[in-house]
Amino acid sequence: MGGVPYWYTTGLVLIAGVLGSLLSLAILVLAFLRLRHEAAARTRAEQAQQESDARYRLLFACHPHPMWIYDFETLAFLAVNEAAVQQYGYAEEEFLTMTIKDIRPPEDIPALLANVARTTTLYDATDRWRHRRKDGTVIDVDVTSHALTFAGRPARLVLAQDVTARTRAEAAQRRYAERLETLREIDQAILAEQSPEAIVSAAIGHICALLSCWRANISVFDLASHQGIVLGWAGSGTPRFPVGTRLSLEEYGRQDLEALRAGKIYVVEDVQTCSSLPATVQTSQADGLRSYVRVPLIAQGELIGALNLMADRPGAFTTDEVDVAREVADQLAIALQQARLHAQVQRYAAELEGRVAERTAQLMEINAELEAFAYSVSHDLRAPLRSIDGFSRILLENYADRLDAQGQDYLQRVLMSAQHMRELIDALLTLSRVTRTELQREPVDLSALIKAIATELQQREPARQVEFTIAEGLQASGDPRLLRIVLENLLGNAWKYTSKHAQAYIEVGTQVQPDGQLAYFVRDDGAGFDMAYADKLFGVFQRLHGPNEFGGTGIGLATVQRIIHRHGGRVWAEAAVDQGATFYFTLGGDTARD
Amino acid sequence: VTENIVEILLVEDNPNDVELTLHALRRYNLANRIHVVRDGAQALEFIFCTGAYAHRSIENSPKVILLDLKLPLVDGLEVLQQIKGDQRTRLIPVVVLTSSREERDIVESYRLGVNSYITKPVDFEQFTEAVRTLGMYWVLLNQPPILAS
């Protein structure tokens, strides 16, 4: 670069000087500006600090939920808020000398330490813990924590929300639901079972589980024999008094029994502090019994047994549980009482059945006797009658020449009497057969039957002038053989009691009764009778006419009535002296036709 | 051997009924060859030719047996059963002549193979008529099978 002119160099220096001054100025300006900027930034930082402090107070110190910061390594409290002080009862200074273990029930500490050891995340989600306050009360808390550095130490910020009221309410709700469920199960078990043993064995397991018993049993008492019997057992180990064990009531304890008799629950909080223990309790104590409750089973004011709850720790049963026990016991008592009544009813029913069987046997015996009687009437009474009739006739036929008129008249009387006796025997036999034979209902063409009987009557005495009017198409449901006996008797009577009239009229028809039943009737215009004696019509051997007026056995209408009654029907008559009679009968089950 | 010719065996314990029956048969000259036994055991001895009747021959059977049901020792239904249950005697006509009108007796008799069942009428005229008809029919009219001898 040789050859550069001087002025050129000088000029450059000059320019450089000016530029240098300008640069210095610019730097000054810049420095000033920067200073100003830094001052502003400082002010902003101070403000932020203040805001942060306020936020801290708002978020931590004045937070309505207890909060604290603890050292993640030493577990010592590093800071606590006012709400924590209020909740736990320790002053802030006290807190700062404690570790988080100190606000736990001792039994929860191992779990706490395990949880701390596990915690690696920045943020630890909500977890439920039990905390202990200074006064020793234990509360349920939902805990959230997250990691931070506090005074250069790894620490965790904890937010603990007291949820005791909620969890207690939830627990109560759960217990209530459980209780309901158990009571319902017991109810169902009780309903399904009928014997006291079955009821108790269905319920005892539920009770033991519901009330967290170590062992439980149910005894029923028989106050008369002064004994109790174990009906059900549940629990751990081998029962000292298994189901079926009979104990004298003394063995339940005098005081225990006194309370039970008074309808009171008997509670022993700790058997070790009890001076006199019943024999049974002493036996169970050897297995580890520490506390027990006896709940009376009372039905209709009477002590019928006890529900015994046992635990292997003192004071095991809460008031709440005792209440439940009482509820269950009341239910059980009702069920047991019902079972007793049921058994009683069954006993009565069996007794009744036995009595019915006995009566039936007696009746069958009587029936057999009656049958034997009828048989012997049929056979044995006829034979002498045949002799009387036969030899009288032989006398009349072969020896008439050796008898005077009076002797012959007497023999005639013997014959007439024998004849009457034969009729009586026949009628009695018919009556007894009506009672003995089984009723067999079938459709019967009454009109045809009546016509047949009328024809028989007419053929027997062709000289009689009797006009029959028989309704057509009379149908009935009944035993045809028995209905024939009814109609033979009624038509026979109509025939007989019109015999004094030269011209007679007999009508058979039906009439609908006010109750809708269809009644059949046989009407004649014969001798009739005085309605004052109508009640005697159907009795055995009852007659409204002397034998000189009209013959008869006095058994026919009794037979008719018996047959009608066996059909479930009714028979009655309307008559007036010398104005004829009408006999009505229904057959039961028949309804009037349109 | 005339005493062996018996046309009617009457099994009847009631002496009055026996007399009345004989009287009725006599009227119609049917009483000559009648033999009367008073109980079921005698009836069986006669029919099966045992005991007091051991000398009889079983082929020499009566033309008809009139049998009462209610009998001492062996009752009429038992006698009937034995007669009808034995090849040698089952063809002998047996007529039950009894006071019983019981359905069960009638049914049982027919079940056992009775040839006829007559209820003794109480009325003497009817009784006589019944006995006469019986005698006429079974002794005079009925043609018994020729028994193998």
Image: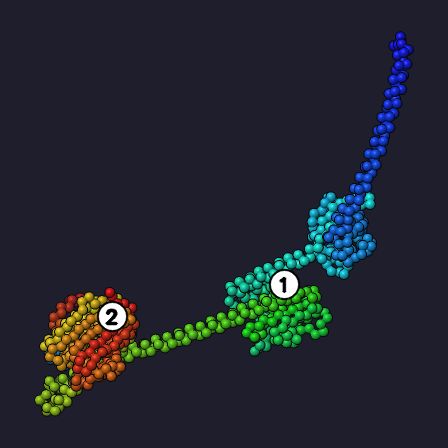
In the depicted structure, whether residue A65 falls above or below residue A366: above
- Considering the image in quadrants, where does the N terminus of chain B appear? bottom left
The extreme left residue here reads A401
* CA–CA distance in space, label 2 to label 1: 74 Å
Please give the name of the residue rendered at 20% of the width and 71% of the height, measured from the top-left corner.
Answer: A509
Which residue, as the protein is rendered here, is positioned at the far top? A3
Give the numbered dot on residue A8. none
Write down the residue under mark 2.
Answer: A512
Image point (29%, 71%), residue name = A515
Whether tag 2 and tag 1 are in contact, CB under 8 A, the answer is no
- The location of residue A37, given as percent across then percent down, is 82, 34
Horizontal and vertical percent position of residue B111: 24, 68
Quick one: label 2 or label 1, which is nearer the N terminus? 1
Q: What residue type is labelled 2?
A: Val
Q: Where is residue A330 in the image (x, y as percent from the top left)?
A: 57, 69
Q: Quadrant of residue A132?
A: bottom right
Find disc 1 in the rendering and name its residue: A211
Crowding at dot 1, Cα within 10 Å, few <14 / some 14-19 / many 20+, comes out as many
